Image (cartoon, grey):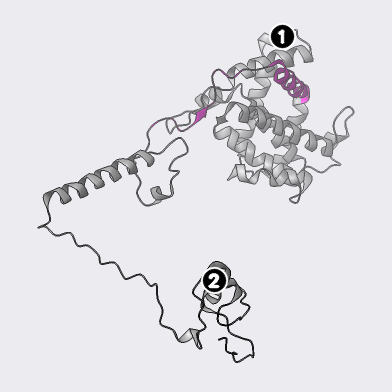
Amino acid sequence: MATPRRNGQLSSCEPCRTSKLRCDHASPICGRCERRNLHCTYHPAPLTQTLTGIRPKKKRRVVCESDHPTNVNRLHNENDIWTRKKASVSTPGFLGQTSYFDAFTDTRTGLVVGNPYVTGHDDFPVDQKRINLGTRVLALLENLPFYREVVTARFKIWTGWSLGWPVTNMVFTLAEKMWNSVETEGMDTNQRAFFLSKRLFETHNRALEVHPSMTWEDFQSAAAGRWELIGLLFTLTGLATDWVPHSDRIFMRPNTMDPKSLAITATAVGDICLQFCDSTGIVNDIVAWLLLHHTTLLAVVYGESGLLFHSLPANVA
């Protein structure tokens, strides 16, 4: 028989209470227990019952030296299987250790000696669309003396910069040698840009290995003929517009871009060159310089709250 609780409500039968179901409190058998053919009982104080159904604690098995040899061999076999399994999943790949377990057990026996630079895909197909886009970018090198004057004026204001004048001068010197090469002599701007665009797609995916014994001349020859070098040239020019006064005589000449248009053009060229490098999988020092300065230029032109700026810091990291 259901007895009232302290709050005045009738208590439920044991099957309904343990199943957390609504009980109709019928006596001697509630309707739910009658339909399910369950043993219906009403306990006057269900919380005072002794707990049942608790599983007994398992006894830990201690392996002694006196155990049967077959058991010891079985344990050794299990350890060998686990060792082989751990070795199979802990081998570092191209991106290094990828398993969370490798943070505690590093399977590498020493430092990796070899080429840490990614040279890109040698058989990467270059379509006509990319060549035409590169032609439009290289056609802007027609105003290369103007870009050099802007960057030079920036160094006259303050000589300190992230790359410094030697590297900056090298970037412009290599671009000038490429644009004024003997092979392009007699060509107009579009023909020269088209010829150089095809040439850059053929040569820019070669390796750029920087080592302690590398000379300055070796680095210059390895850095020439790369899309990342062209992107770095325009990015540095765009950053220089934030230093040089907009009323400077450089921007007052006829048929020259104003500082704002020059900075916007530099961001577009830097983004295109980064896409060329990303599509071929190229990673080297110049690409890192370009990515860092391009992110800074985006913050200068569009602000740190712009969507274009927030899409690049992860790549820089």
User: Residue 86 placed where, x, y %?
Assistant: 34, 44
Q: Nearer the viewer, residue 61 or 31?
A: 31
Give the extent of the magenta segment: 114-143
**SS of the residue at dot 1?**
loop
At x 65% / y 17%, what residue is drawn? Answer: 126
**Of pointers 1 and 2, the one earlier in the residue sequence:** 2
Amino acid of disc 1: Glu
Q: Nearer the viewer, residue 226 or 221?
A: 226
Q: Is residue 73 left or right of residue 131?
A: left
Does residue 85 appear left or right of residue 139 in this picture? left
User: Hey, which residue is sitting farthest right in the picture?
Assistant: 254
Corner quadrant of residue 293: top right
Whether 151 is among the magenta residues is no
Count of all numbered marks drawn on residues in the image = 2
Q: Is residue 133 magenta?
A: yes
Mark 1 highlights which residue? 185
- Identify residue type, mark 2: Ser
Label number found at residue 7 = none
Which element carries disc 2, helix, strand or loop? Answer: loop
Name the residue tied to disc 2.
19
Which quarter of the rendering shows the N terminus? bottom right
In the rendered image, residue 166, in percent from the top left (x then y), is placed at: 60, 34
User: Is 33 situated above or below 171?
Assistant: below
Residue at 76 percent of width and 9 percent of height: 187
Quadrant of residue 254 within the rendered picture: top right
